[in-house]
Amino acid sequence: PLHAPGPGRAPTYKDSLMLSFLPHFLRGSLAGLLLVSSTLCWACLLFGMTLVKLLLPFAAAQRLCSKIMSLIAEGWIACNKGWMNLVQRTRWNVQGLEGLEYQHSYLVTSNHQSWVDILVLQYQLNRRIPLLRFFLKQELIWVPIIGLCWWALDFPFMKRYSKAYLARHPEKKGQDLATTRKACAKFSRIPVAVFNFLEGTRFTRAKHDEQQSPFRHLLKPKAGGIAFVLDAMGEQLKTLVNVTIHYPDGSPTFWCLLSGRLKDVVVRFEELEIPRQFVGKSYDQDAGYRAEFQQWVNQLWERKDQLLDSLHREFPGNAKA
C-alpha cells in the first residue's frame, strides 16, 4: 500500500504547518510565490559565485567554486521539497534507493509523462547522488533566470541536427558529439549524475499512436543521446540508474503539483551495470555497435513497460490505463 498516516492519527505540529485547509487555488498561488521567491534568492547566490569563479583562473579554485555552486543548487531543490510538503502530504511509494552513493557518478534515465517528473526526481535523489545535470536544447538558455542558472551549473546545451539538415550541411556532422565531449570534460574530475529522458519528449496518447510505439505506456526510446555520453565519459560512468515513475491518478500538470493535488506517486529505481563493450565506441560510425546498443536500450524499455503494467494494476487510482 501507499505510505499514509493511519486513521484516527492525532494531528502533529508538522501537520499544523501544512496548507491543506486552504482552497487549491490559494495553495497553488502561495506555492508559486514561494517557488519564485526561492528561485530568485538562490539564483543571486549562484550568480555571485559564478562571478567569483570567472575571476579566479586557477583550476583548484574553480573546482571549489563549482562544488559550492552545486551545494547552492541542492539548497534550492531542498526549498522546493519544502513547499511541496507544505501544500500536500503526498503519499510516496518508493523502492530501490538503497546503495546509491553521493560520491559516485551515474547515468540516469526515466520515463517522461509530465514536467512534474523533474521535481519528483529531484525530490527523491537530492543529496543522495550528485546534482542531476540534464542535456538541454540550446534554445532553453534563454529561459528567464533558470536558463542562466543552468549555464552557470555547466548543464550541457545541445544543438541537434536532423538527418535532412546534415544532408544539406555535411560539415556539421559530428558537431553534436564534439559538443557533448566538451560539456562532459568539465565533469571528468568530479562525481556527476548525467540525466537524459530517453523518450526525448513527454508521453501522450497522440504521440504514442503517431509513432506507432510497440510499448503500451512508453514512447520509442532514442538511444543516441546516452550513447554520445558513454562515448565521451563512459570510463567514469559505471552504472545506469533506471527510474520508472507512475502516477496512479494520471499524469499531473505543474499546477496540479503547486495546488496540492498530487496525492500519490510511485517510483522505482533500478541500478544497472553499464556493459563495458558500450564504452568508447562511435554510435554514428559503427553500425554494429549502434544496432547492439539500440537492442540493449529496447530491452530496458520492454522491462520498464512490463513494470508499468504491474504498477498500473497494483496502484490503479483514478487513472485510465
Image (spheres, rainbow, N blue to C red):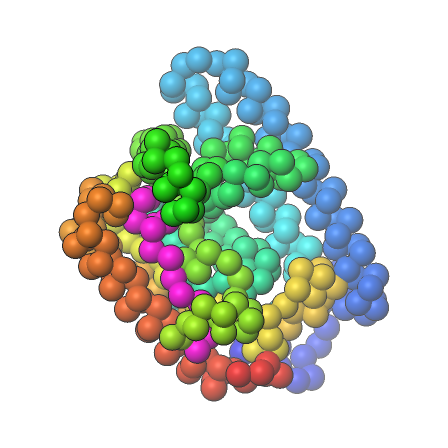
Residue at x-position 51% and y-position 43%: 137
Q: How many marks?
A: 0
Hey, which quadrant is residue 23 in on the image?
bottom right
Query: Where is residue 16, by image quadrant?
Result: bottom right
Q: How far from the left and from the top, in percent, is residue 295? A: 25, 64
| Residue 180 in sight | no
Above or below, 118 against 186 in this view is: below
Q: As rendered, which of 285 and 203 lies closer to the eye? A: 285
Left-right relation of 22 to 223: right
Q: Position of residue 3 (x, y in %)?
A: 55, 76
The reply to whether residue 215 is visible in this rendering is: yes
Residue at image x 51%, y 34%? 153
Foreground residue among 260 and 289: 289
Foreground of the two, 192 or 60: 192
Q: Position of residue 149 (x, y in %)?
A: 58, 35
Q: Quadrant of residue 141?
A: top right
Residue 30 falls inside the magenta stretch: no
Q: Which residues are magenta?
A: 216-229
Q: Residue furthest front?
A: 168
Q: Residue at x 70, y 65 (%)?
A: 256
Task: Give the answer, above or below, for where 198 lies relative to 318.
Answer: above
Tell me residue 31's x, y (percent).
74, 55
Residue at (47, 86) in percent of width and height:
313
Q: Is residue 220 magenta?
A: yes
Q: Tell me: 142 left or right of 18.
A: left
